Image (cartoon, rainbow, N blue to C red):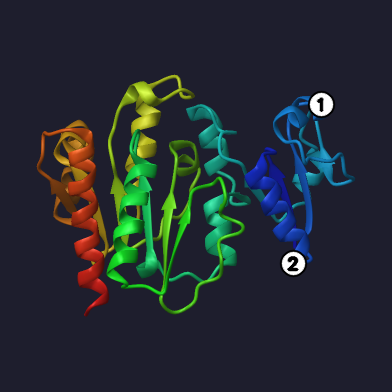
Amino acid sequence: MKYHIIGINQSTINTYKFLKKNYFETTISDHKKFIDLKKKLKNIKSLKNFFFSDHPKKEIKNSNFIVYASGVIKNSLNYRKYIGNRKNISEIDFFYKHNNWPSKNILIITGSRGKSTVAKIIKNKLNRKKIFKKIIFMDRKNINFSNIPKYRPGYFLIIEMDYQSLLIAKKISAKFRIITSYFKIEDKVFRNEKLYKFTKLKIFNNTKKNEFAFLNKKTYLKLKNRIKKLKKKITIIKTDKTIQYNNNLLSNEVINKIAETFSE
């Protein structure tokens, strides 16, 4: 089995190390020069399996899977080419492929603003309730998709996903899902709002009957034309107060549903 990784950052370097540790043939590349990447990634080395300034066509062609880094896809044309090739996967697809976490023990949080705040509120309150033995927060700084600890009974996982990671996810599997907010002004990469909105709405993909999605009223009103059919599966927090108040109310609603689920 051979993997090639497109895009070099700290997260994909960890993915590269994981694959090499598990004896997969792996290469990695970036269109940027080594000297430019080294300015941001001080621990990066110019190794045999690292390619800079371009992506090696031969290595890509001979790979069984091509793992794309968050941020590589920047427009609809790039996305259509990416999604049309079965070999292409994202880092979260990689996680689902190589990890054993059950969806009922996963919460995914996305949103234009407030992802980290809501994740931390939920983690702290769940810890105080002592529902789980351990709660892991995947924040992409300390823990990313390749170094999430393996699942053990009593563990719960909170995944914070930015819109560039969510765009290229081919699979979403989580019992609990949150959109904290929607502000098109926070899109710094895509040229049109249509793609940005499409990306945020992917949080609802593959939502099953016994899975739950949460958002506040303001966010729902911005997205409702695209999610009316899913309204029965969505919990809408009706509040028009401050962001801090809304985040706390949203977090409490999610925590109550998690506690209810794991007390059954």
Q: Residues within 10 Å of mark 1 (few under 14, many from 20)?
A: few
Q: State left or right for residue 123 relative to residue 13.
A: left
- Looking at the image, which is closer to me, 192 or 127? 127
From the top left corner, tell me how far across and down residue 199 is, in percent. 39, 37
Q: Residues within 10 Å of mark 2 (few under 14, many from 20)?
A: few
Tell me whether the residue at label 1 lies in contact with that at label 2, contact meaning CB atoms closer than 8 angstroms. no
Q: State left or right for residue 257 relative to residue 113.
A: left
Disc 1 marks which residue? 35
Q: Secondary structure at mark 1?
A: helix
Q: Secondary structure at mark 2?
A: loop
Disc 2 marks which residue? 22
Query: What separation in Å lies between label 1 and label 2 (alpha carbons)?
Result: 29 Å
From the top left corner, tell me how far across and down residue 196 is, in percent. 38, 30
Name the residue at 49% across, 37% down: 164
Please indicate, yes or no, whether residue 96 appears anywhere in the rendered image. Answer: yes
- Looking at the image, which is closer to me, 244 or 159? 244
Name the residue at 55% across, 33% down: 73
Q: Quadrant of the C terminus?
A: bottom left
Disc on the earlier residue, 1 or 2: 2
In the rendered view, tell whether residue 176 sits above or below residue 57: below
- Looking at the image, which is closer to me, 226 or 214? 214
From the top left corner, tell me how far across and down residue 6 is, in percent. 68, 40
In the rendered view, tell whether residue 17 sits above or below residue 155: above
The amino acid pointed to by label 2 is Asn
Q: Find residue 261 and report its image quarter.
A: bottom left
Name the residue at 39% across, 43% down: 116
Q: Quadrant of the N terminus?
A: bottom right
- Looking at the image, which is closer to me, 223 or 128? 128
Q: Find residue 103 and report its image quarter.
A: bottom left
